Image (cartoon, rainbow, N blue to C red):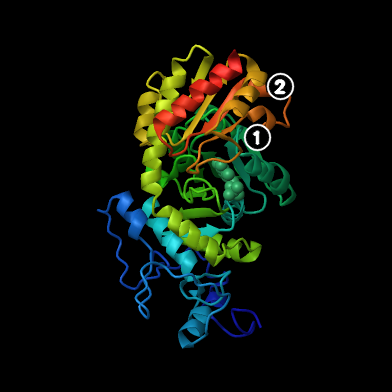
């Protein structure tokens, strides 16, 4: 017997001819919510939301904060059978792949931060991306996306979607004309990253939203590099905002997770894909993610301040030929970027004179910046695109993308600013003497 009961029984879902998740005409409430006294208070500052939203105190024990519900299944009662039968299984606890209190606590916190009706938490950023994209397009669909996507996302679009009968065009994310020109009659989705890797180009979200609206396309934004503290893509008209929660949302480089947020209607569709592809997040990882989220606003303030100090320092350093940073006052699009981003996040990219050899020496000379890929954790990291994210390309291909020899990417952490600057000063001296 399926979780939805006997195949032959009549249910409203079957009468409508569509699964209730996919039925976009069904009326819906935001959520699901863990606490019955939930009330969305739009006046709360993000720092307050980070601490309080979604967190659940156990009424039986009075334990403060969400306990870990490390269980795969839940007692079935009349209410749950009814939910299954009538098509609101997403609003009841039945089985942890379908939903679990620890998942709901995280989802509610993210929803309040992103100003979304509903959110889902996944076992990785890639699980969130693949389930979301496949939840929003049909067979035969065409997608327009960026030339310089996150590698995993590029591989998903490039390798997996064609075998499912979908095509993707990859265009310069800053060239709105090229984006419009790439749209075909069968285009259904625009997919872009808020800030590109590694050159930290910031998209024109307002321009993209206009294109999406004009052409009746869904707009999906991977906002991993910004976090909901620095940008709220849904407020700018995006339909879905995605995160690799492995980065800023969790913030401690100790778990892999992803999130998706948007209207309840679209999130129900994506929930169906989560069920079928199986990328649910384990309750214990949810607990860790919820704990990390409590300090998101505090951490982002430190990332924003430290990265600005590092970018300013590198901008006037004689051994640095170029700095890529979204909020440098000398950037020609500084004013429009400032309208989009409250802070730049922790990423700073720069070109070191002396090329990739000097960059390697720098990576090995630093003490506080650790040589590792990924980003968004409390600890500062250094990585070089030529031997990590862009290692599969030739030097010429990288050059064409603007990634020159000597390109260094920093994920600036939350350590003391002056300690980080001193470490860079000493490292650059050792690498270029
Ligand atoms: C890391 C990352 C992903 C993938 O997330 P995982 O949690 O590693 O699956 C997707 N998009 C961006 C921008 C990322 O940085």
Q: Position of residue 388 (x, y in %)?
A: 67, 34
**Residue tagged by mark 2?**
395
- Asked whether the residues under the numbered discs 1 and 2 touch, taking CB atoms below 8 Å apart as contact, a structural biologist would say no
Q: Which badge, 1 or 2, comes first in the chain's sequence?
A: 1
Q: Nearer the viewer, residue 368 or 313?
A: 368
Q: Quadrant of the C terminus?
A: top right
Neighbour tally class for label 1: few under 14, some 14-19, many 20 plus, Cα within 10 Å: some
* Any part of residue 17 in sight: yes
What whole-number distance in Å separates the C-alpha atoms at marks 1 and 2? 13 Å
Mark 2 secondary-structure assignment: helix
Q: Nearer the viewer, residue 134 or 222?
A: 222
Quadrant containing ligand 1 reads top right
Q: Nearer the viewer, residue 427 or 47?
A: 427
Q: Is mark 2 within 8 Å of ligand 1?
A: no
Q: Position of residue 252 (x, y in %)?
A: 50, 49
Q: Residue furthest left?
A: 43
The answer to whether residue 185 is left or right of residue 297 is right
* Any part of residue 403 in sight: no
Mark 1 secondary-structure assignment: loop
The answer to whether residue 323 is left or right of residue 418 is right
Q: Quadrant of the N terminus?
A: bottom right
Residue 143's place in the image compared with 417, above or below, is below
Q: Residue at x 69, y 30 (%)?
A: 387
Q: Nearer the viewer, residue 202 or 26?
A: 202
Q: Position of residue 187 (x, y in %)?
A: 59, 43
**Residue tagged by mark 1?**
389
Q: Position of residue 116 (x, y in %)?
A: 40, 55
Examine the image and state in which quarter residue 303 appears. Answer: top left
């Amino acid at each position: 017997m399926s979780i939805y009961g006997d195949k032959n029984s009549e249910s409203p879902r079957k009468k409508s001819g569509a699964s209730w998740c996919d039925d976009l005409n069904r009326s819906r409430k935001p959520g699901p919510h863990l606490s019955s006294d939930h009330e969305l208070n739009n006046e709360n500052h993000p720092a307050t939301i980070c601490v309080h939203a979604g967190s659940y105190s156990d009424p039986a024990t009075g334990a403060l904060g969400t306990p870990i519900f490390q269980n795969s299944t839940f007692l079935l009662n009349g209410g749950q059978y009814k939910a299954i039968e009538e098509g609101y299984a997403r609003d009841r606890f039945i089985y942890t792949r379908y939903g679990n209190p620890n998942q709901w606590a995280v989802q509610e916190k993210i929803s309040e931060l992103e100003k979304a009706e509903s959110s889902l938490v996944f076992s990785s950023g890639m699980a969130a991306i693949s389930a979301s994209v496949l939840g929003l397009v049909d067979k035969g669909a065409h997608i327009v996306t960026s030339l310089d996507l996150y590698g995993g996302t590029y591989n998903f679009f490039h390798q997996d979607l064609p075998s499912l009968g979908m095509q993707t065009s990859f265009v310069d994310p800053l060239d709105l004309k090229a984006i419009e020109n790439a749209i075909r009659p069968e285009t259904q989705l625009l997919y872009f990253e808020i800030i590109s890797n590694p050159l930290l180009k910031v998209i024109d979200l307002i321009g993209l939203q206009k294109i999406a609206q004009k052409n009746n396309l869904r707009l999906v934004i991977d906002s991993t590099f910004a976090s909901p503290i620095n940008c709220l893509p849904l407020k700018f008209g995006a339909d879905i905002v995605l995160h690799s929660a492995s980065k800023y949302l969790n913030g401690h480089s100790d778990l892999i997770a992803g999130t998706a947020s948007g209207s309840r209607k679209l999130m129900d569709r994506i929930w169906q894909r989560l069920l079928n592809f199986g990328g649910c997040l384990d309750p214990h990882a949810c607990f860790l993610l919820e704990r990390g989220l409590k300090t998101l606003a505090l951490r982002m303030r430190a990332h924003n301040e430290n990265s600005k100090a590092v970018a300013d320092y590198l901008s006037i350093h004689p051994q640095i030929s170029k700095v890529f940073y979204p909020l440098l006052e000398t950037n020609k699009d500084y004013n429009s970027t400032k309208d989009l981003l409250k802070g730049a996040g922790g990423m700073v990219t720069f070109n070191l004179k002396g090329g990739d050899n000097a960059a390697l020496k720098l990576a090995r000379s630093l003490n506080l910046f650790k040589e590792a890929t990924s980003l968004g954790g409390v600890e500062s990291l250094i990585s070089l695109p030529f031997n990590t994210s862009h290692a599969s390309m030739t030097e010429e291909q990288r050059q064409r993308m603007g990634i020159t020899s000597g390109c260094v990417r920093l994920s600036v952490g939350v350590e003391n600013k002056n300690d980080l600057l001193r470490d860079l000063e000493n490292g650059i001296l050792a690498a270029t003497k």
